[in-house]
Each structure stands twice: as structure tokens, then as C-alpha cells.
Amino acid sequence: MPLLSQFTPLGHLRMSSAPAHGQRFYGALMASLGNQYNVEPGSRMDGFCYAVAMGLARSRYTLERAGDQADPHRVYENLPAREDEYGLVPTPGDTIPERRAALASRMLLPGGANRVNVTNALRELLGDDFVAYRPCPKDEAIVWPLNLGDQPMNLQRPEVPRRLVRLMQNISTGLGAPQAVTYERFTPLPGFIADYPELRVGEQLVVHPENDALMERVEVLASWLEPVGETSYVLMFSAAFTKPHPAGVLMTTAPFPYWVSSKRHNVIVLKAAAAADPEKRRQVNELLGRMLRGVSTWDIAAESTPGHAGPFKVGEGLLGVTPIGDLTL
């Protein structure tokens, strides 16, 4: 607790039992005078030393407050300016400690996305609501396709002719066996050959690349122009499709090095109430969107028991909050 005295008027009082700055300056000034002056309480020199000491104390407190503006845990007067500097927009109900915590976590961004830095940023932001930051362990990571070059990857040299076409009919039957289908030329994109839109025999074609569940790579077994009447024709080719595809999907011969892994997936575990709080989730998503790499993904989960998150149970778990399985933290 502070010690109240003539050295702790308004502006000098601090919640500390340490001597006030004014008292320390006053003591130093009085000690430096020696015995040649009358320093009895109430004397002229006593008043002079007290006035000088309090002036120096005010300067010291002002410098300390100025220094606090660089510390996210102590900033007050310049808090709105520091928030604007880091792109923070507090909500109407945010308290000063909550705003300081958000600022402190944002100031850790330049430190990168290593585990220690992300953990510290989440702890600064959420305080006791933060439980654990769990990147996907290597032995739990799922890689698809299993091997380099497997379906639906299309590994080609950079100079391979790049064709972009559109499937013109549904594919749903006869899967696994060669079948003929119609296609049309798609508006060429930069880098695609516009003068030769028809496919060539032997080319590797990625079908439906915009859908990771239905995409596949096929080989063009035959390609021809099918006459329609006397003056028109349609483009056709044959290939062995193993998945169904609706009409209108894209197909391309361009290199398609599709290889994904869950290694960059992270789970952020919070206390149950915080994990279900939309505002807490927004803050976490915003922070991780700035800190983690562009290929990283994450989920926000609730702690179920100490050291565990999940598993999901009917009537108890929350979709998007409770993990399906049991995660050990």
C-alpha cells in the first residue's frame, strides 16, 4: 500500500510501498547541503528543497508515463493511437485490460509463426481462457496422395502445351472403361495455347480440378472432330474416367502438382465458455490469420477435461467446438 505524506499529492500517489520520487529527491537534496544551512522544518531552505524535489518528481513521473506508452501492458493515454497503429478496432464492451491484451498479442506478430511466439500471443490475448496451442504432430499428419505423382497429380515439364477446355456432358455410368465425351474450347487464359484447342492423344488431362473430391487425371486415348450436319462439328475425346463429373467442369493439361497434408493444421484449445464465445473466436481467428503461414489452417476447440479436448458426444458436444475424437494436449 502507498504511504500517504506531503510527497504524495494528486498525481504523485502510486499503489506501492516504495518511497515516492519526491521524498527520495528531497532526501538527496537535504543530505547534500551539509551543516551550513538551516534545514529545520519550515525554514526557507527546507521549502526550497521541497519545491525542487516535487518539481523533479513531476518530471520523473511524466517520463515514466511517456515510457509506459511503448509498453502494451501499461499504455493508457496513447492506447487509441497504438491500437490504430496495429490495425485494432476495439468493440464497445472491451475493457482497458482487454484492449491492452489485444495490443500485446498484435505486437508479437513480427516474431513469426514459431510455436513459442504463437503460444505467447494467444496467452497475451486470452489470458486464463487460453489452454493450449496444438500443431499437428508429425505422426498424425495425413498426406494425400500418398506418393509423389499419384492421382490426381499431373507432373509435367513447364513447356508442356497448356490447354483449358470444358466438359459438355455428364459422366455417371461406364466408369473405369474408356468412353467418348464431348467438350468445348474454353476462353484461353494467359499461357494457354489458343490456336489448337483440341486435345492430343497421349496428353494427361486433369478433370474437375476445382473439386478435391472428384478431381482426377486421365489420359486422352483418342481425339477427333465429330461432324454435326454439313458445316459444323463438335470436339470429342475418349478416356477412362473413374469418377462422375457434371457437365460444365473444367479440364486442363497444365501441370497440376496437387499434394496436400494436414501437418499445417493446428488446434487452439480454450476454456469451454471462451471456445463458444463468438467474440473470443473472432479475436483468435484474426490473430492467427495474421501470424500463421498462408498454408496453415486451424480449429478452435473447447477443453473437456484437464489435458484433453473431446471426444464429441451426442447431446453434450457442440459442432465446431468439440473435437470428434479425443485430443491429448
Image: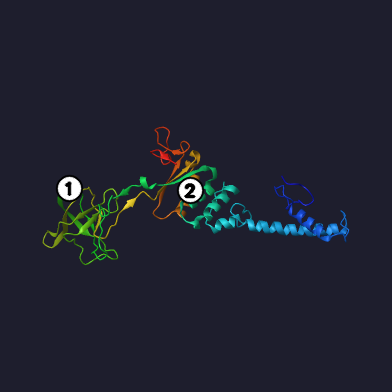
Q: Which residue is mark 1?
A: 176
Name the residue located 33 percent from the left edge and 52 percent from the top edge. Answer: 260
Measure how far apart labels 2 and 1 are at the Cα level: 46 Å
Q: Is residue 157 visible?
A: yes
Name the residue located 15 percent from the left edge and 49 percent from the top edge. Answer: 177
Residue type, numbered disc 1: Gly
Per the image, label 1 sits on a secondary structure element best described as loop
Identify which residue, 121 or 103, lies in the foreground.
121
The mark found on residue 56 in the picture is none
Q: Are marks 2 and 1 in contact (CB under 8 Å)?
A: no
Give whichever of discs 2 and 1 has the lower sequence position: 1
Name the residue located 19 percent from the left edge and 59 percent from the top edge. Answer: 203
User: In the image, 203: left or right of 114?
Assistant: left
Residue type, numbered disc 2: Val
Q: Residues within 10 Å of mark 1 (few under 14, many from 20)?
A: few
Quadrant the C terminus occupies? top left
Residue occupying the far bottom of the picture? 195
Quadrant the N terminus occupies? top right
User: In the image, 26: left or right of 311?
Assistant: right
- Here the colouring is rainbow
Residue occupying the far left of the picture? 230
Residue 94 rendering spot, x and y as whole percentages: 57, 47
Q: Which residue is mark 2?
A: 284
Identify which residue, 82 or 142, lies in the foreground.
142
Name the residue located 21 percent from the left edge and 58 percent from the top edge. Answer: 204
Residue 135 rendering spot, x and y as whole percentages: 42, 48
Residue 324 rendering spot, x and y as whole percentages: 38, 38
Does 323 sit above or below residue 117?
above
Q: How many marks?
A: 2
